[in-house]
Each structure stands twice: as structure tokens, then as C-alpha cells.
Amino acid sequence: MQRPSVVTIVLLAAALALAGNMATNTVQVSSGWWPYAIWGVVALLVIATIAVEVNRARDALDVTRVSRLTDPIKLGVHPAASVSSSRVPPFIARDRLPDLENALRTGGFVLVVGDSTAGKTRLAYEAMRRVLPRHLFIRPRTPDALPAALALAKRKRRSVLWLDDLERYLGFHGLAELPRCVVLATMRTHERDDLSHRHDPARSAGERQSARVGRDVLNLVTVEIRLDRMWSQDELALAGASDDSRITQALASADKHGIAESMAAGPQLLREWQDARDVRGAAIVAAAVDVRLAGYHRPLPLDFLRSLHTSYLDAADRPGSWEAALQWAAQPLHGTSSLLEPSGDGFLAFDYLVDATAQSPAIPTATWEALIEHAAPADLVEIAWQASYSGQLDQVERVFDLVLDAGLVMGAMEVATCLGDAGRTERAVTMLEQLVDRAEGVVSAEELLVLRGNLVWEMGQKVDGEGDPVRALALAGQVADDCAALLGAEHPDTLAARLTLARQLGGAGQPGEALLLATGVGITAAALHGADHWVTRRSRFEVASWTWTVHGAATAAPLFLALAQQLGSLPAVRVSEFVDVLWNLGGTLLEAGDAAEAVSVLADAADQAALAFGNQHERTLRVRLSHLEAVAATGDPGELAASLAADCVAALGPDHPTTVDALRLSTRHGA
């Protein structure tokens, strides 16, 4: 939130002093027109104060009549090659245009979702201009300006609040109560899908809380429009009728790329970066891309980018000048997009490059360190999650201290949870106990429940044979009871708390009771929420797990297989959920004597785990260990065992239980 300017303070103080003096007769006035004149001066000072603040707020906003908007590039549309001085090709009506226009006429919160360079921002821009030309257009230039934009939109009901790249604004709680105006937002597909409820079974409690914050905003969406990157035959036919050379050229590769994607030069820019001769320019782009992959989406100031990119240069490189490299990176290709795009007072990596490299980030430690020093505390939570996936656990611990020092208790909880998920469970328990003590009277009752639930999860049994479930059992029961009292017995989070209680019961030596409780929760969840709901699927997982303990692997294996098949039939499932099911399926197959099938299943689970968590994450290392144990049952794991042991020592330390098991396996097979 912006602080009042010095001018504002002086004006307001003057107005209040004058009014106060009049009220206490310190200013002596005679009868006649003088009192009215003085009150007029007070009114003018107050008006001036308001005007100063309004102007300051508007400095952070773009505010104009929709009909006066003439440059879609300023609103986030990717430019195309310049033809006759125009960098914006003619608009080709997309199939979803009528749906979007109808949604804007109705009003409310409208969200357009699509891949990078699918054309979603252009579609939103054109529909808004057609349907709402007389509305006031309000756009925050940065996420920090969102409160000012919301305040103005609340005063102007006939307005459009424009939020391109909605994910940048989800951490701002002001969005939970949107103004009664039209809200028009865009969001990239993978950012939207990542918040889906169906992914929650595979999230930790902290991840679920973070996703819930985003969903609280997305639940306010009245209409969601999905826009495909690849164009339909009808859309291609309309494009074919255009005489614009840029569209004609894009049509030539329509079987491989979307029309908007080609005109924005996404594929060409990716090749330009990969084949760059300017090593310094390539390093600048790599640094900017890695910053976004690390979870930071604000523009990078030039001095920060200049300092950061040096760690991407090799000693043998002979880079050119900084100025030439920056010019190359920021130069639009054929007048279209550029590798680095100007944004506010800095630069952002072109989002097409970020999406293209998202599956294999290898971010240097120096980048994590510099980014954590640079970012504001509110931005550090997402950075911590990404750091944990990259095995940068020391950096996660640094983030915890910074976030807690800033007074962000729930953010610190997420950081502690991701640290525990990545293998530093004891440290995470200590952090969460500290937070629970500090949270009394600071956070809401529901948030305190989330905190205590996280503590149960980290303290007790998360996976077989670890944690202290006896110690966690009493707290798990209290959390389940408190969830029922606060949220209701049928709420999904209450049912999930009972499943966590079942996990601790089983870990504490009562597997029969755990199986009975999980079975009952599963029946309730299916009846209330359906067979495909996340809490129902989690119930099935717990039932299969405790069936394994009570009735043996041969009985449990078909249950895990059926769950895996169910996940495979759903439109989209978070990879981490699928990993856990495959991991346990492989374990039951191995114990039941089908080692060959277990090797195949666990190899797939290990590949999927690396995709979901990165190669250095504890869960990936555990799955790899299970895979090698299956390999050892059929032959000699050889150098693979030694490689795993070395990776575990590097990521988790020599004394971690997973490392100890990996070293034992390596020693047993002489690696």
C-alpha cells in the first residue's frame, strides 16, 4: 500500500489545524463573510489533499475510456512483424469471441485461459472494445498498484478492471472481495490448472493452503473462456481470407504452431536464444528465464539483471559488452516479441521461453541466493517451493527466517511445510511448533487449524516407518474434532483431517483401526462429494495402504492398480498424486513376488517424480530407491546404486534415513 506523500500530509495537516483552530476559537473571526471564507479555504485544502492522492494513485494505474484504447501491445498483446508501420495484424475472430462478448455484456468476473501466445489477451482486448466502449478502463501497472485499482473500480461501477496474467495478483487478498464492475483477466493454462482442486491429494497441507488462496479468487469467476493455441478449421478459413502477409506466412506452419504463436515469433525466438552467438546476451536471457522458473514474476531492474547474469558466463567465454548484449536480448525479432520484454522499470523473460524450458530447470545456487535477497517477503513463499524442488534446502531455511521476520505467519508455515516435504522433517516440526505458539490471537481460527494440521503431518507418519505417530496421535484427534466443529463433519477438509488421524493410528500400531476409519471416511466422501473428488481418492489411497499392512501386499496391489486406472481416466491429475499411487503399487507388486512388473511400474514412478519434484527432491530419491530395490530383486543394480547413494548424500546429508538405506543398498551390491 502506498504511503501518503509529504505534500498530502502537509495539506491535510493545514486543513485540520485550521478547522481545529476555528472550532476552539483560536482563530478569531468577526461576523459576516469571514467565517465562510475560512471554511472555504479548509474545503479547498481537503479537496487538494484528495486530488494529490488521486493523482498519486493514478500514476500507478492506466485509466481511460475503453473506446480510447488504440494500442493493444501496451496491454500485453504480443506484437507481430511491422507492416505499413503497424505491429498489430488484423484481428481474426476466434470461435470463442461470441461467448466472451456475451459474458462481458452480462458482467462479473470473466477469465480467458490459454497457452502462451494463444491469443487470449488480443481476444479479450477486442471483445472489450466491441462490447464495453463507454466503460472506464482501469489497469494496475504492477501488482502493488492493485489496491488503488480496486478502490477506483469500487467508485466507478461502469468500469473494466483489466488483470492480464492473473496469477501475478493472486497473492493479494483484496481480490477476495471484487468491486461490482466488470473484471476481465487472462491466465496461462498451466498456471490455471495448477490451482485445480483435483491436485490437492498430492499436495502437502501447506501447498493446499496456497492453492486455496488462489482458488478463493478463481471461485469468483463467473465465466471462464478456454482458448486453444492451435486454431480450428473455421478460424483458419477466416485467416485464409486475410490479405495480411504476416497471417499468410503464419498459415504456412499452421500444422505445427498456432497462428498467434507464429506471429509472435515464439518458436523463432526460442531458436534464436538456443543458437545465440552472443554469449553474454544468452546469459542475460538465461538469468531472466531462471528467475521466472524460480517463481518470481516481477520485472527485473537492470542493475539486478546485470549482476545476476555473470554467474551464467563460463571462465572461457569472451563475452561482448553489456550494452550490446542487452540490446540484442531486448531487440524485437522482425518487429515482433523480444527475448527480454520491457515491463515497468525492468524486463521480463518472454513467457514462451519460460514455458518451453519449464520441464528441465537447472537454476544455479547463486541465482537463488541473489533472488532471495532481492524479493519482497510476500514473494518468497513461491520461491521457497521452487527451491525445494531443486534441492536448495539451505535457501528454503533462509526464506523461512525472512518471511517470519516480516510477520507473515501463514507464509512461514508454507515454507516450513515445503522444507519438511523435501526431507528436513525435524527442522520443519521445530518451525511449525514455533509458528503455532506465535499464531494464537494473530491468525484466524481456520488458519490456526491449518497450522496445527501441518504440524501433525510433519510430526507424525507421512510415509511408512518415519515420524513420531504416537506423539502426533493426540494432536491429530484434536485437529479432526476442531475441523468438524468449525467447518462441519461433512466438509472435505474435515474428512481429510480424519484420514490424517487414520495415518497416525496406523503408524502408532493400530492398523486395523486405521483401515476401519479410512473405509468409513471413503464411504462418506463418495456419497457426499462423488467418486472422483480429491478427498474420496485420498480415502481410497489410505484404504489401500492399510489393507497392505493388515491383509498383505497381494490384497492391496489390486486396490492401488484400480486407483491408478481411475487417475488415468480423469481429464487431468497432478503428477505427484500419480507418483504416490504408482510408488505404492510397485511396492505391493515387489512384496507380492512380481519383481519384474514392479521394476517397470517403479521406473515409471521415478521418471514422473523427477518431472514433478526435480531430481534432488527427497520424494524423487525415495522412489528411485524403491526402483533400485526392485532391480536388485531381479539382478544387480550396479552403478545405479552408487549414483543414487551419492545423490542422497548431496541432497539430504549422510545421516538421513533415505541416504542410509541407499548407502546400505550400494554397499550390499559392491558399488
Image (cartoon, rainbow, N blue to C red):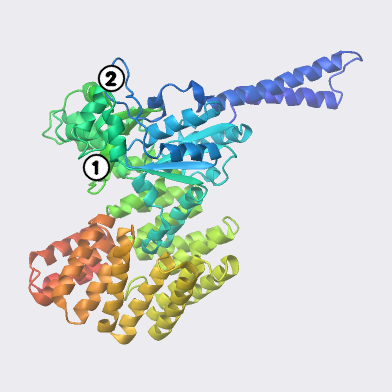
Tell me: residue 94, above or below residue 541.
above
Residue 317, image x, y percentages: 12, 32
Q: Which residue shows up at 16% across the image and 69% down it?
A: 600
Q: Quadrant of the C terminus?
A: bottom left
Q: Residue at (59%, 40%) from the top-left corner?
A: 179
What kind of residue is marked 2?
Answer: Ser
**Mark 2 — residue?**
82
Among numbered discs 1 and 2, the one appearing first in the sequence: 2
Does residue 653 appear in the picture of this structure? no
Other-residue count near label 1 (Cα within 10 Å), few / some / many at <14 / 14–19 / ≥20: few
Quarter location, residue 111: top left
Residue sitting at 35 percent across and 46 percent down? Answer: 189
Name which quarter of the figure residue 544 lies in: bottom left
The amino acid type of the residue labelled 1 equals Ala
Which tag is nearer the camera, tag 1 or tag 2? 2
Residue found at x 33% / y 77%: 545
